[in-house]
Image: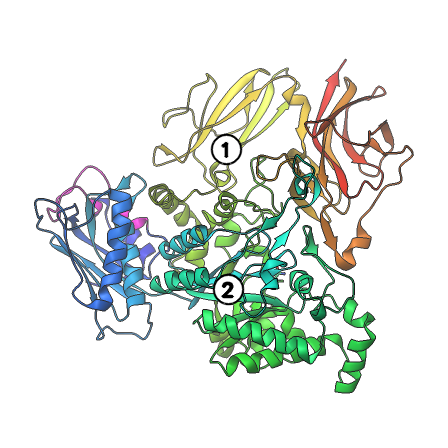
Amino acid sequence: MATSRVSAALLLLPLSLFACGTSTAGKPLATPESASSTLIPIPTSLVRNRGSLRFDAGTALHASQASSKPAAALFADLVKRSHGFAPGTGMKQSASSIAFEIDPALRGNNDEAYVIDIDAKRALVRARSARGLQHGAVTLWQLATDANGPRSTLPAVRIEDAPRFAWRGAMLDSARHFQSVDEVKRLIDAMVVHKLNVFHWHLTDDQGWRIEIKRYPKLTEVGGCRQPSGDAGTNANGEPVRYCGWYTQAQIRDVVQYAAERNIQIVPEIDIPGHATAIIAAYPELGTTTEPLKPVAEWGVFVNLLNTEDSTMVFMEQVFEELVALFPGRYVHIGGDEAVKDQWIASPRVQAQMKALGLKTEMQMQSRMVARLEKFLAARGKRLVGWDEILEGELPQSATVMSWRGIEGGLQAAGKGHDVVMSPVSHLYLDYLQTESPNEPPGRPTTVTLRKLYDFEPVPDDLAADRRHHILGVQANAWTEHMRTYDRVQHAFFPRMAALAEVGWSTSQTRSYDDFLARLPAQLARYRMLGIAPARTPFEVSIDASAANDGLASVSLSNATGYRDIRYTTDGTEPTATSPRYEAALSLPQTATVHAAVFVDGKPLQSADRFAITPASLLERTDETMKMCTGALKLRLEDDTTVDGERAIFNVDIFNPCWEWVKAPLASTRAVSLRVGRIPYYFQLAHDESHRKFKPASTPHGEAVLKAGCDGPTLATAPLPASPGANGFLELTLPLPAQTGSKDLCVYFTGDTRPAMWVLDRIRLLPH
Ligand code: ACM
């Protein structure tokens, strides 16, 4: 029996070998078995053999060594959740058994490798280490589950598997929004079933300090609380609201142990010298500015930097001393990103220190701090990691660079002999939305689709062969400015964590996006079994409907993730596998209801999306279905009407807020109706702030303006009031002079209305 790569095996084996249902070797059955082709991440090598192993509560579970027990326990726990029973507890012992074994004699030198052999009598999972055995347990559980849910057989297979990269990371920002210990553990659990092994925990930022430091209690007492911006910052009695949260050292130890038991290393991050407003708010003597500061409730880049005094470095070392005592892992992250140097440039004290030290640039000053911390950490057996800005100065050789502004930093760092983790904003930032759906939560509308993340290649082609080993791996980052709740964190991570898993684990030869899409429904079923709530948006059907010249509506359906089997109905019923398949734009009456869903293997991926088409809806656009005039800094933002509840969400370019309906059919339009919302202007953009455009107003509170094209002639204006209605919205009707044909219709608001800004919610053309 020769081993072959999975994709080849899938192509070469006849379907009859995919038989399922009994342990009778070789007997062809009617239903093709899919379980072994639903593994995520796809293994290095998988060979299917004839037959299968019965799997039920009577299946015995063996793990005789102490070091093999955790993997068996993990498998049993996952099975409990998917199948509702614990293996080996059935009344009637079945003839099948599963064994987990640490086998030091296994070939290879990858500590995370494992081998699975399944025949009609037993499944054997072997690895040289408990880490490898854990991955084997996850694979075995995946073999026991597919798109239909739990299975009662395991396919006969031999799997030999090992990760491509040693660093397969996920970052959670607990500073911008705070997650409970339980939520952090849920994320760690999810990482386990994706074979990820590094949890990067972003614990401090301008908006909050989230880790108890015994020596400096004000870090959490003062730095751990902020007042939310806008209306949400005040309660019904007019009192300030406090948004607080931090982890006690006991909680941190608990999470560290929880992660260690699951073979996940936690890399804590304390971000210096920038992103430091919360630290400086707590201990003003650490700051460069003499202005009193508070933890901020706005987003963006702030100019507040730690100062460069020796006493400040001693303070930070004392903080890192407590940190290294809490986190036993090898790596400690010191941030280093976006440290805008204005305050150091303006500070006579910092400038005098630089002169005395013979330093010519402020970046050299930052590098000096990094070098000092590197030495401090190295003396404690730790390795320093920092964002790629740390590469701009002299960097100790042992420092690891996390390449976020692109892959160039990583390429350069690896070229210089630094270890690198690839985490580029373009492909691996999870605060970027996954689709353009109007149902996306707030975030950054430049999309990081499943496909974009999946197609990321961590080792750049132009990296020299003898430097490639410096690419330790990949990491996806969930920055939480826009993730107030754990539901939103889940939305950001899933299903993209499945794509990340495959980028980090599987070889580039075994990876194929189409094949991944075919395996993904099984992963979605596993999410359901484990209580993980993935985003719906990647699996939605989206619609584009417009009035056609023939008096009908032209309706296009699509799916952002690339699934092609869309089924629809127009009679109000849920589509089924036998409903019409969408092939090309539909011509429907201008009053119609469309239900549509994506189907894979005859089953809908989720409940159908419903679209009500009316003559009025065909003359309507929302902020999500309009273009931004320039797209300088597009965000998807929510209003501030409640602290915890539902809020309206808007797509807006905060540098140049302006919405464009390309080719709006204006010929028979007598007026335009606008629905307008208002959000807090909660951004600090450091040097970019000056790029923000405020168009001059001619009335006290500014005007709504309609133009023919972003730079075209003005068609209509209407003065704005001081504030919106009680529901947070404003409705305006702007009469339009007679128009011919279609025109690009542009909407913006004049005036500087900070600390709030008007945003477009919906535009509707009113016919004669
Ligand atoms: C970063 O996104 N500022 C690392």
Image quarter hosting the N terminus: bottom left
Q: Left or right? Give the position of 629 relative to 500.
A: right
Q: Residue 458 carries which label?
A: 2
- Mark 1–mark 2 distance (CA, rounded to whole Å): 31 Å
Is residue 595 visible in the rendered image? The answer is yes
Question: Residue 404: x and y, percent?
Answer: 59, 63
Q: What residue do we see at 34% from left, 36% from top?
A: 601
Q: Nearer the viewer, residue 636 or 305?
A: 305
Q: Which residue is nearer to you in this view: 454 or 729?
A: 729
Q: Is residue 19 magenta?
A: yes
Q: In this view, does 223 lie to the left or right of 16?
A: right
The front one of 379 and 537 is 379
Splitting the image into 4 quarters, where does residue 213 fall?
bottom right
Question: For numbered disc 1, what is the local secondary structure?
Answer: loop
Pointer 1 with pointer 2, Cβ within 8 A: no
Which corner quadrant of the image does residue 140 belong to? Answer: bottom left
Judge from the rendering whether residue 245 lies leftward or rightward of residue 126; answer left or right.
right
Image coords of residue 761 (percent x, y) = 69, 31
Question: Residue 752: horizontal and vertical position, in percent?
Answer: 83, 42
Which label sits on residue 541? 1
**Residue 126 visible to the viewer:** no
Q: Pointer 2: residues within 10 angstroms few (<14), some, or many (20+)? A: many
Q: Is residue 328 left or right of residue 613?
A: left
Q: In which quarter of the image is the C terminus?
A: top right
Q: Earlier in the sequence, mark 1 or mark 2?
A: 2
Looking at the picture, which amino acid does disc 1 mark?
Val
Figure check: 343 above or below 634: below
> Is 76 contained in the magenta span?
no
User: Does residue 510 lie above or below 620 as drawn?
Assistant: below
Q: What stretch is highlighted in magenta?
A: 18-38
Residue type of the residue flagged with mark 2? Pro
Residue 500: horizontal and vertical position, in percent?
46, 56
